[in-house]
Amino acid sequence: MMMGTNKLVVLVLVSLSFAFATEACHVKGRVYCDTCRFGFETKATFYIPGATVAIQCKNKKTMKVEYYTEVKTDNTGTYGIEVDKEFNEHNCESVLVHSPVLGCNKADPGRSKATLVLSHYKNGLLNHVHYANNLGFLKDEALPQCQQLLKYYFSDV
């Protein structure tokens, strides 16, 4: 019985060593429509399927883009992409590219990009999944119920 437990522990440790030997990072995030133009997500927010997001990394010294790829969000407004190597000496970010929603396709300047750390060994991160802050597009005109929402958010309830 003890021998079986030891083999299981060794098998788990070997599996984990292969899992952490990879340099790949998985980036996940969501894209939303700010229907109230508040600059943050609310109860009236909806997530945008088919939005395009770019992952780009610039060399810290030259500021030249050395990695760029685009991905589309799924039906829940969520995107996920695997970046196949680490970028220790780079400034990386997820950036809004396009919204397919008419009337909600202008990027919110404060929520149009999110900083990413695409490295795990030198930064103490042990997880290969990196969650980006949600990115937002602004609706052309705020919904009528937004004034009521604003009162709700700033009430002392």
Image (tube, rainbow, N blue to C red):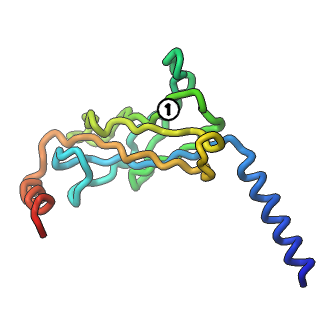
Residue 44 screen position, x and y as percent: 21, 57
* Above or below, comparing residue 5 to residue 151 in the picture: below
Q: If the image is split into quadrants, where does the N terminus sit?
A: bottom right
Q: Amino acid at mark 1?
A: Cys
Question: Which residue sits furthest top?
Answer: 62
Residue with the mark numbered 1: 92
Q: Nearer the viewer, residue 67 or 99?
A: 67
At 52% across and 39% down in the image, what residue appears?
117
124 relative to 74 in the view: left or right: right
Crowding around mark 1 (Cα neighbors within 10 Å: few <14, some 14 to 19, many 20+) is many
Residue 19 screen position, x and y as percent: 72, 53
Question: Which residue sits furthest right?
Answer: 3
83 relative to 145 in the view: left or right: right
Q: If the image is split into quadrants, where does the C terminus sit?
A: bottom left
Which of the 4 image quadrants contains residue 120? top right
Q: Nearer the viewer, residue 84 or 21?
A: 21
* Above or below, comparing residue 89 to residue 28 in the picture: above
Label 1: which secondary element: strand
Residue 43 screen position, x and y as percent: 22, 60
